[in-house]
Image (cartoon, rainbow, N blue to C red):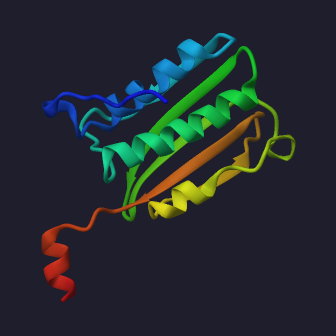
Amino acid sequence: MPRINLGQNQANSLALLVESVVFPLLRDHPGQVHLEIDIDLALTTPGDATATGTLLESATRQTLDAIGGDGELSIIAVPTPGGIEIELSDNGPAIASRPEIASLLAARHGVKMQQHDCPQGGVATTLHFPKRQTNSDSRRAA
C-alpha cells in the first residue's frame, strides 16, 4: 500500500492526495494507462486524509484491475451541496463482468459508493463524501 506523506502545507489538498495515491499504482500497473485528473487545486480533502487515501487506493486498484492492461482512467472531483463527489471512470469492461465493489470500507467512513456503466463504455465509480461538520455546525444543531 502506498504511503501518504504530504507536507504540512499540502496536507489538505485533494488533488495532491489523489496524485500521491494514484501515481504509485499506475507505476506498478502492467499496462499503459492514460490518466486525466480534473480536481480544483483549492479543493480540500473531505475528512481524514489517511481514510480518504485508503478509499481512493481501493477504488483505483479495483478500477485498474478491471482495465487489466492498457486503458484510460479519469478522476474528477466536484463540490456538491452535500459534500464532495470523486468519480473514477475508465474504459474497462461493464459492471456485470467485474467483481463486486468493496463498499464496506466506504460505508465505515460515511462515504456512499456507486457504480454505473458509461454510455461510451467502461464504468464510473463515484464516492460521495458527506460535508464535514464544523464546530459552528455542531453548535447550531445543539
Q: Quadrant of residue 89?
A: top right
Identified at 82% across, 40% down, the residue is: 94
Q: Residue 44, position in %: x, y?
A: 27, 44
Identified at 19% across, 75% down, the residue is: 137
**Nearer to us in this view, 70 or 40:** 70
Q: Residue 13, position in %: x, y?
A: 26, 36
Q: Is residue 56 left or right of residue 135?
A: right
Q: Residue 11, position in %: x, y?
A: 22, 36
**Nearer to us in this view, 131 or 54:** 54
For the C terminus, the quadrant is bottom left
* Residue at the bottom extreme of this rendering: 142
Total label count? Answer: 0
Q: Is residue 122 left or right of residue 23?
A: right
Q: Is residue 98 left or right of residue 12?
A: right
Q: Would you say residue 110 is visible in this rendering?
A: yes
Vertical side of 121 occupied by 26: above or below: above
* Residue at the right extreme of this rendering: 97
Vertical side of 44 occupied by 34: above or below: above
**Nearer to us in this view, 129 or 59:** 59
Vertical side of 72 occupied by 4: above or below: below
Q: Residue 122, position in %: x, y?
A: 74, 34
**Nearer to us in this view, 106 or 37:** 106
Q: Would you say residue 91 is visible in this rendering?
A: no
Identified at 72% across, 14% down, the residue is: 70
